Amino acid sequence: DPRPLRFTSGSGFILIYIDQLTVHLFLINILFLRTLEESCMLICGDGSSYFPDKFSVTLFLSVAMKSGGTQLKLIMTFQNYGQALFKPMKQTREQETPPDFFYFSDFERHNAEIAAYHLDRILDFRRVPPVTGRLVNMTKEIRDVTRDKKLWRTFFISPANNICFYGECSYYCSTEHALCGKPDQIEGSLAAFLPDLALAKRRTWRNPWRRSYHKRKKAEWEVDPDYCEEVKQTPPYDSGTRLLDIMDMTIFDFLMGNMDRHHYETFEKFGNETFIIHLDNGRGFGKHSHDELSILVPLSQCCRVKRSTHLRLQLLAKEEFRLSALMEESLQTDTLSPILIRPHLEAMDRRLHLVLQVLADCIEKEGYSNVVEDDLLVEGLNTGTAPQR
């Protein structure tokens, strides 16, 4: 059967789609930022990946606000015409999401975007476009280079003599919620742009387990315990690996505490034999003191998981490959390290055991072969091996 095979090689992250007639080679890391050398992005053959120092200091040619979305994001264009999405710092590492905040009004955190990229790699999903942290001079690198008059007009000097701006967006774009530097330096995350739609068309899908985004209403899956049976009979979840990919995404979101997964995207080229792109992870890592079990509902309702994912989770629960330790080590490579405070790292270990308990309950109830789907039949794709440090 046609299926995408994933490899990591010295020349990049290659997706090879094989059928009877064609072989499509997508050098994904080249497409992310146009070219490997010019983007300064490398994905190494041993599975590790990083942004060289050059990327963290490459000059911006122009800056503009990104349209759409609820909170301020900037499109940064480099001198080589590569582009990245910049999310400025809105909360300190120590701040938690207030308990009375709804998930749809939570802040988007730059450090959550960075941490999500590292977590995605450690889980061996590799579906988050590369993200790195950067300290930006708001005067020289944003205000003085932007041609966006609407953005430029929102700059001001605060009573504490710090440079501030707020831009235009649906939430938190006002003088009261301004982003202020120290005095003009601000942290942010830089996420590699996906390929231009002219090169690689994408499709946006509504998440079947999307929340209601309403203060009083509940979504159907929250009141119907048999909701997954309905999803299983609905394309594209009735064939291929899409439902299993949703389970991967569910686990990924639960480990981060991310409740804001309303849509997801895929590349059109592969049809239903594709993979989900894990975009917009800024509302993760908001609460380390609370585990939001409702995020795990898709997993507990469907009781399905890939064998590769199950093996990886079991491995990360072992003391010698503890998830929190691998995350801490990986995050130390980022320019803005430390990215997460200790309680968030410990929360991931705690949540990992909760995921494994849900799967253990499913296996006890339905049997191993009915819960765990063997996706390791293709030689060389066994991902249950020890993670690369």
Image (tube, grey):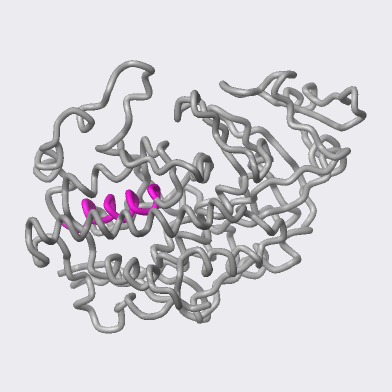
Outermost residue toward the top? 216
Is 277 placed above or below 164 here? Answer: below
Q: Return the x and y of residue 283 as percentages of the image width and height.
A: 50, 39
Residue placed furthest toward the right: 161
User: Does the segment drawn in magenta span residue 246?
Assistant: yes
Name the quadrant of the N terminus: bottom left
Q: Residue at x 74, y 59 (%)?
A: 56
Q: Is 296 positioned to the left or the right of 27 in the image?
A: left
Residue that lies at the very extreme toward the bottom in this rendered image = 379
Residue 287 coordinates in the image, percent (x, y): 51, 41
Identify which residue is drawn at 23% across, 79% down: 378
The x and y percentages for residue 241 are 21, 58
Residue 232 or residue 199, whichever sits in front = 232
Residue at figure coordinates x 37%, y 45% from the top left: 265
Nearest to the observer: residue 372 or residue 81: 372
- Range shown magenta: 240-254
Q: Residue at x 48, y 78 (%)?
A: 388
Residue placed most toward the observer, 47 or 368: 368
Majority SS type along the magenta span: helix
| Left or right, residue 6 beside residue 240 | right
In the image, residue 102 lies in the stretch drawn in magenta:
no
Measured as percent of width and height from the top left, residue 361 is found at 17, 56
Q: Is residue 155 above or below residue 308?
A: above
Judged left or right of residue 379, residue 72 is: right
Tell me: residue 40, above or below residue 91. below
Total numbered circles: 0
Drawn side of residue 127 relative to residue 237, left or right:
right
Identify the image quadrant of residue 163: top right
* Residue 330, quarter of picture: bottom right
